[in-house]
Image: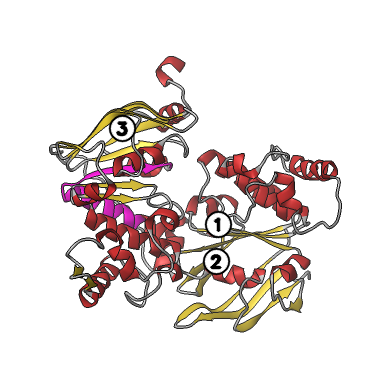
Amino acid sequence: MQPPVVEIRHVSKYFSKVIANNDVSFTVGKGEVVALLGENGAGKSTIMKVLYGLYSADEGEILIDGKNVRIKNPKDAMSHGIAMIQQHFSLVYPHTVTENIILGNVHGWIRLEEYDSRVKAIADSYGFDIPVKAKVKSLAVGVQQKVEILKALYLNARILIMDEPTAVLTPQESETLMQFIKDFASRGNSVIFITHKMKEVMEVADRIVVMKSGKVAGIVDRSNTDENELARMMMSSDLEPAVRDEDSSEGGEILSIEHASLADKSGLKLLDDVSFSVHAGEIFGIAGVSGNGQDELCEAICGALRLSSGTIRFMDKDITDDSVRSRIDAGMGYVPVDRHRDGMISAMTLSENMLLKKSYGREWVHNGFIRQKELAAYTSDRIDKYQIKATGPDDLAGNLSGGNQQKVVLAREIDSGKHLVVFNQPTRGLDVGAVERIHHSILNEKKEGKAVILVSTELSEIFSLSDRIAIMYQGRIMGIYRNGELTTEEIGLLMAGVDYEKAQ
């Protein structure tokens, strides 16, 4: 009987007080797709970093093709045919696609044209349409991920680890990736697929390893399970989907945007004559494929970008030229799309991150000194309320899992947003449990009478939470509709820039 391609036996990994992996064991067979499923912080990425040599196991052993091996670094992993594509790409953006793929794998003088041809041949064999001579910085995120995959294929990887590979992809790009995984496995290769998305698990996995609190909670065949059973294994409970109250009444106008336009330095319009209003007790959803002006719109609302023309009114006051600080003081909260870049500082503690937007106020600062005890007590309360997995307010934000980092940002911004909270893709890259908790938080803000703007590329999220839905395409509002007026297909056409009424 052929041994498993990968066998992880009783592996444990510790980080100071935190047990990241506790006696983890599972196997991966040849030509098999194994999904690692679990909440953020369950230990999925850690065990894969042990397999790839980024971390060393404190206990246990790893077998490749039945032989005990020591993987001390990624070079050792690659020598066994293991490659890992992580959530945050490791690409050199000023270099071309080919240069990124051969970087560190060639020496001396080379004929770049020959390598262009080699890389293109590999790309073509998997149906990847990639301009190998283009600089990576000019490529869309979905294409950049294909470049990461090509790096692994160029090194003849036969065991591919993919960590949350669809977190930054559009639905169409996700479908292409799912097809690649099936194709790659059908050629006798193996895939370990770290994810929190049930739909993807049920689409491509042969077996599912469910992790909880650093341990293996169960291993099941895809054909013998369903989403509810997986949720129970992950969270010890059934999912409780957030339900929007369709009969709730809306209050007065909180935010009004009229004829807002914004152009970059080259004159390219990022926002094109955008107008809408949001009322108290309303969730205003904005749907669209990433990169169609949603980020710029959110930053214009919170004051990080200034409009080229148009006006923004908040609480019946013209704030078009107001500073970010004055908008915060007026009761505006903003959960940005990139928490690492715009929402938190990883090297700071949770308390310090909670203080960030109020460091100039009197709530936590007295005579130039931070009121540490009061701030720590407040942070501890937020940790409990938002179920943040942390040992206390002195934990570094960078040591938390992505979902728990997002909860920290969410807790701060919801408190800051007394009248309006702008959520820009608040659940991107989060597990199903964290998503449901955040959905409940968003709906609670609506119940509190706040105005909510929800930007999301997930149509299911837009439909389940929004009262009205605006569709954006290339910086324009293609239309604003009450929830239920349009089907998914009709909104999909608008997201692609097609007027569905004219297309009929």
- Which residue was labeled with disc 3? 484
Q: Earlier in the sequence, mark 3 or mark 1?
A: 1
Give yes or no for contact between labels 1 and 2 (Cβ–Cβ under 8 Å).
Answer: yes
Image side of residue 47 versus residue 396, left or right: right
For the record, the magenta segment spans 436-457
Residue 444 falls within the magenta-colored stretch: yes
Image quadrant containing the C terminus: top left
Q: CA distance from mark 3 to mark 1?
A: 34 Å
The quadrant in which the N terminus is found is bottom right
Question: Within 10 Å of the Cα at label 2, are there few (<14), some (14-19), or many (20+) other Cα atoms?
Answer: many
Name the residue beneath numbered marker 1.
87
Q: Amino acid at mark 3?
A: Gly
As shown in the figure, which amino acid type bears the numbered disc 2? Ser
Q: Position of residue 190 (x, y in %)?
A: 70, 59
Image-quadrant location for residue 85 = bottom right
Task: Tell me what residue is drawn at x 33 percent, y 76 percent.
Answer: 392
- The verdict on residue 501 being magenta is no
Of mark 1 and mark 2, the one earlier in the sequence is: 2
Q: Count neighbours of disc 3 (C-alpha within 10 A) and say few if under 14, some if 14 to 19, many if 20 or more.
A: few
Q: Secondary structure at mark 1?
A: loop
| Image position, residue 437 (x, y; %) | 32, 58
User: Which label sits on residue 227?
Assistant: none
Q: Of callouts 3 and 2, which one flags the residue occurring earlier in the amino acid sequence?
A: 2
Question: Residue placed at 32% from the left, 68% from the top?
Answer: 352
Q: Circle 2 is placed at which residue position?
A: 45
Is there any visible trace of residue 273 in the rendered image? Answer: yes
User: Left or right of 371: which side holds 96?
Assistant: right
